[in-house]
Amino acid sequence: MNKLTIILLIIVSLQANATDYYFSNRGSDATGNGSQAAPYASIEKLNTLNLNPGDRVFFKRGDTFYGSITCGGSGTSGNNIVFSAYGNGAKPIITGFTTLSKTTSGNWTQISTVPNIWETTNPVNNGLSTELRIVTVDGRDMEMGRYPNHTSSWGGYLKYENHDGDSAIIDNELPTTTNWTGARIVIKYASYMIDTAIITQHIASGGGSRLSFDPEKIKKKSGLPNNWGYIICNDPRTLDVHGEWYYDKSTKKLRICLKAGTTPANYTIKVSSIAKTFTATDRSYIVVDDIRFEGANEYGISFQGSKNGSSNTVVQNCDVQYCGLNGLHCGVNTDADYNWLVLRNFIADCHDVSVYARNTRGVTVYGNTIKRNGLLTTMGGVGTQALIGVWCARSNYTLRRNYIDSIGYVGTRWTASDVMIDSNYITNFTLVIDDGGGTYSGNGGSASNRKVLHNVIVNGLGNAEGTNRKDFRSYGIYLDNSSNNVEVAYNIVGNCKDGAFYLHNSKNINVHDNLFYGSSIGQRQVVWICNDLDGDQNMISQLQFKHNTVIARARNEWVMKIFVRPADSAYLGLIDEASGATAGTNLNNGIDSNIYARPFNQDSAAIYAIWGTYVAGSEQKRYYTNAQWEKAFGHDVHTANALRLAAPGVNDDKAFQFHYNFSTQDSIITLDRSLIDFKGSVYAPGKQYKMTPYSGAVFLDSKAAPPPKNNKRYQHSD
């Protein structure tokens, strides 16, 4: 018998021995055999099975199964272990929720009537060793009680005026009539960071209070800043708004505040009682398909294990909702590609990260819908690695055709080589903390082959509440410290509070053929190029910024702002024209062939440059119109001067129309009035305009005059 025959016999044997197991609420663990005719009933039974390559586990559609699946084996290449659904109807549900009784007698005790607070008579979470993270009321994810409420002034933060190292804050206004010892403090001490610790002491300080806590729980180690914000939570005395709750870890009882005049019988109240609803540890070749997971106190679907201990897993067509930490979690640290595929899932209402693969190489996230991640300030993750839609810090990471909406911090974060961020729709981000972006990269160093292409990124709202500043810092595309070697092209970016594109201390960046559109509220610039750190590794160099359309929407908005050191100044050609130096010597026409437009203030300076910032007392600040910018430095010699306003009385907010198509199909829009685009084309009312997938356009009321006919941007190619 030859070797090929032996291999074929082994494969046939494996396939013949593969088993299908069926689970139904009408099944029986005692009398069933796992067949479709006699299915098993419970996850407890499933967890006793030793699964082999090729085995498949099917849950009946329309049924709900309580518990935590522990994957009991690994597949092989071509013989995955599969968890999926059978029958007709809605996806089968794997739930970690316990539904609390609606019957008040014997199950609930009313603690007070104003506010209307109820407490469970018996423990509700004997299965959890950690704090409770998920409580829903009629399907709505509720935040634990907090003081002050999020509707209060300053975005629901108290202010501390002083601090004592990293272990205490002093609030001059907080009275000591309520002693908050034992409650939790949530501190916002940077625009992009919140942290939390237990209050160990609350004593009087002057006319206010001193709150002490364990400094090891706070990641800020260089001294807390003054005049920032904090919240008190995890204390029953904070309950005063419908749905707010408190969980006592010692008694394992739940208190909840409800609308006046109602009782728990009026609502469906659920609490998480399972840490993870699916776990695979050191398992490979696993497919999880077409199942709904909900109510995990930590992770919905979790792949764990030793370094390089597993690979080749797929999560597809699943719903993952109401997770106390991460929706999909891959905690495997790999040196080679893990090959994790996350395909066409719906992931929502996770408190920290929707898709987490920080230390995992070889991750593809495709076609998913991700919503409402990290929105509960007191209950999300902490530090700079939290409240993120998709987080992958290792190489060979692809994020394509995802819909990411309503994120506490950044839509997607990435760092390493071989990254493709392509054709995604990212909207409504930096809602809890800011100084972040729709897509964010930092500390890439020598990483290479990184591309951000064809994305629609809009509505970076920012959140300056609880900080000592008034400006909102949110960017569509944010390339932070050492985000080197990145191509940014064909993106549609707009309505972001502090800029559509922010380049910060990075080099070898190629930005071309993008539409960058401003914001009417609070934005200072559309494009920001900034180096505020010393050292050649942070130099802004090898920048190509070409064939972009940059539109300032507001009258006081800079088309471009540049903030650099002297060394960068030489590269960028930012040399004071009065010095007589040759402008743009090292630029090699890196900034050219763009359209810049500030239609409601076009004749005034639209470009703001600051350089020499590390030479005390000799900083240079200049403001340039497009023509002055070209004349002074030789920049943008093929750049158009775009639209001018002909009727100053036109409202500059209502005059604009910003359209984009974030679908995979062409779309047609019908223009509601006479409009002009920034290429000079005029459209009559009722005109239909075709938009290809992941494209966009900005139109202006036709009361604005068309651009000059000699628009050099569209005559020149290089």
Image (cartoon, rainbow, N blue to C red):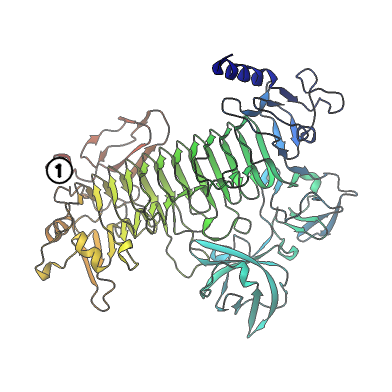
Q: Is residue 268 visible?
A: no
Mark 1: which secondary structure?
loop
Residue 347 place in picture, x, y as percent: 58, 40
Residue under the image location 45 percent in, 40 percent down = 399
Kindly indicate the quadrant of the structure image that contains residue 37: top right
Q: Is residue 83 left or right of residue 414?
A: right
Furthest residue in direction bottom, as rendered? 206
Q: Is residue 356 above or below residue 366?
A: below
The residue that mark 1 highlights is 711
Furthest residue in direction left, as rendered? 580
Q: Is residue 553 left or right of residue 75?
A: left
Residue 546 place in picture, x, y as percent: 23, 47
Q: Is residue 503 above or below residue 394?
A: below
Q: Is residue 382 left or right of residue 365?
A: right
512 or 149: which is nearer to us? 512
The quarter of the image holding the C terminus is top left
364 or 172: which is nearer to us? 364
Question: Identity of the amino acid at label 1?
Answer: Asn
Residue under the image location 56 percent in, 15 percent down = 2
Residue 335 place in picture, x, y as percent: 50, 46
Report the number of discs.
1
Q: Residues within 10 Å of mark 1 (few under 14, many from 20)?
A: some
